[in-house]
């Protein structure tokens, strides 16, 4: 076992001074040592067999001005996806009620926008307040935020704001040109400054190098404080996008990514996000063993497929896992 993985007690303390060299040592450790350390950290910091479940709804689909090379919703690419207007409030609340009845404890709303426009603030805030009133945790992903917008979302009842880094800084320009890495960090600073929980992660399987995956994990881990929620997406290759021909990441490398995230961010929830539809039950099991403790449920994530919820619950039963529950109302 590598020196860094020997002292589990030391790994339990969240730290924001990780170096890439340390991240590389962890990521490249012998697989059994890596997963053992990750599971050891996981069960010391979290309920060993509980998985948080979120459901994601696209409240505004397609027509996005950004050129993210992986995304079916970009107006720059012909993916066959039609743009839609912002979903009416009543339809959003019906979907949230359905998600709660299905066992989701957090409801996430995503809009294909470059940034939140002032004209849409009131409508989005009403959605957040409506979902919050149901007793669910709330999350949105709306693109970049300007001064004062995070505070408005917070006052409406927002718990989490998602804004992913996507990849390492040196790999970023290969994937996106319409928004800088610093733009993303600035939005996350707005979120953190407003007292909203930070949800940020990235995408693997985009043809990035191993060093880039390690760089992404380092960028996430050096945030101070560290993100409360870290979604790890496996690219769902969409025909018509620049990354549509990307080859899937090897499963062992995906598990290494999950395990390294767990060790470097011990208190964060590490979520299996997009790409689960193509993952076997056995690969899911390895990811949970490596410290993943959150998933998206429901049959669709924005515009990409997701496993059927009954299949997820059957998998939980086979693995002896339990979906976390909402806290009792006061």
Image (tube, helix red, strand yellow):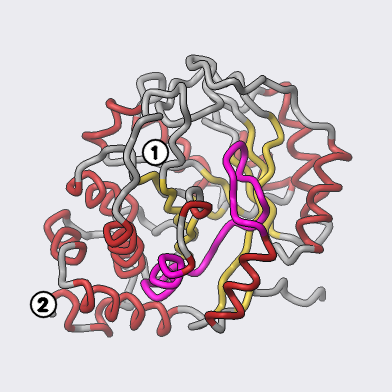
Q: Residue furthest right?
A: 90
| Quarter of the picture holding the C terminus | bottom right
Q: Is residue 71 left or right of residue 313?
A: left
In the rendered image of this protein, does residue 86 appear above or below residue 9? above
Residue 286 versus residue 100: which sits nearer the camera?
Answer: 286
Residue 59, percent across and down?
71, 35
Segment colored magenta: 282-308
Residue 203 numbered mark, or none: none
Residue 263, percent across and down?
31, 70
Which residue sits at x=25%, y=80%?
A: 10
Q: Secondary structure at mark 2?
A: helix
Residue 70, percent across and down?
43, 31
Q: Residues within 10 Å of mark 1 (few under 14, many from 20)?
A: some
Residue 185 numbered mark, or none: 1
Which residue sits at x=58%, y=72%?
A: 315
Which residue sits at x=52%, y=30%?
A: 144
Which residue sits at x=63%, y=43%?
A: 140
Residue 98, percent across and down?
82, 55
Q: Residues within 10 Å of mark 2 (few under 14, many from 20)?
A: few
Residue 248 versus residue 47: which sits nearer the camera?
Answer: 248
Q: Which residue is mark 2?
A: 3
């Amino acid at each position: 076992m590598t020196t860094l993985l020997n002292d589990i007690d030391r790994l339990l303390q969240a730290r924001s001074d990780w170096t890439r060299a340390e991240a590389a040592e962890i990521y490249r450790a012998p697989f059994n040592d890596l997963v053992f350390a990750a599971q050891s950290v996981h069960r010391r910091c979290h309920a060993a067999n509980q998985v948080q479940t979120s459901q994601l709804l696209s409240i505004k689909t397609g027509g996005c001005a950004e050129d993210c090379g992986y995304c079916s919703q970009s107006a720059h690419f012909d993916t066959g996806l039609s743009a839609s207007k912002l979903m009416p409030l009543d339809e959003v609340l019906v979907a949230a009620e359905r998600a709660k009845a299905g066992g989701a404890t957090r409801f996430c709303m995503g809009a294909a926008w470059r940034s939140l426009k002032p004209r849409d603030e009131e409508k989005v805030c009403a959605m957040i307040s409506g979902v919050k009133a149901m007793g669910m945790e709330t999350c949105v992903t709306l693109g970049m935020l300007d001064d004062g917008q995070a505070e408005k979302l917070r006052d409406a009842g927002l718990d989490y704001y998602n804004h992913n880094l996507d990849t390492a800084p040196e790999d970023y320009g290969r994937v996106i040109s319409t928004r800088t890495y610093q733009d993303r960090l600035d939005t996350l600073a707005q979120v953190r400054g407003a007292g909203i929980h930070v949800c940020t992660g990235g995408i693997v399987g985009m043809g990035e190098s191993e060093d880039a995956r390690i760089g992404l994990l380092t960028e996430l881990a050096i945030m101070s404080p560290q993100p409360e929620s870290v979604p790890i997406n496996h690219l769902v290759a969409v025909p018509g996008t620049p990354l549509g021909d990307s080859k899937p990441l090897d499963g062992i490398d995906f598990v290494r990514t999950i395990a390294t995230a767990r060790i470097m961010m011990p208190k964060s929830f590490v979520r299996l996000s997009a790409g689960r539809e193509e993952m076997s039950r056995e690969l899911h099991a390895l990811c949970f063993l490596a410290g993943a403790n959150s998933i998206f449920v429901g049959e669709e994530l924005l515009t990409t497929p997701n496993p059927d919820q009954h299949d997820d619950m059957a998998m939980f039963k086979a693995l002896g896992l339990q979906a976390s529950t909402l806290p009792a109302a006061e």
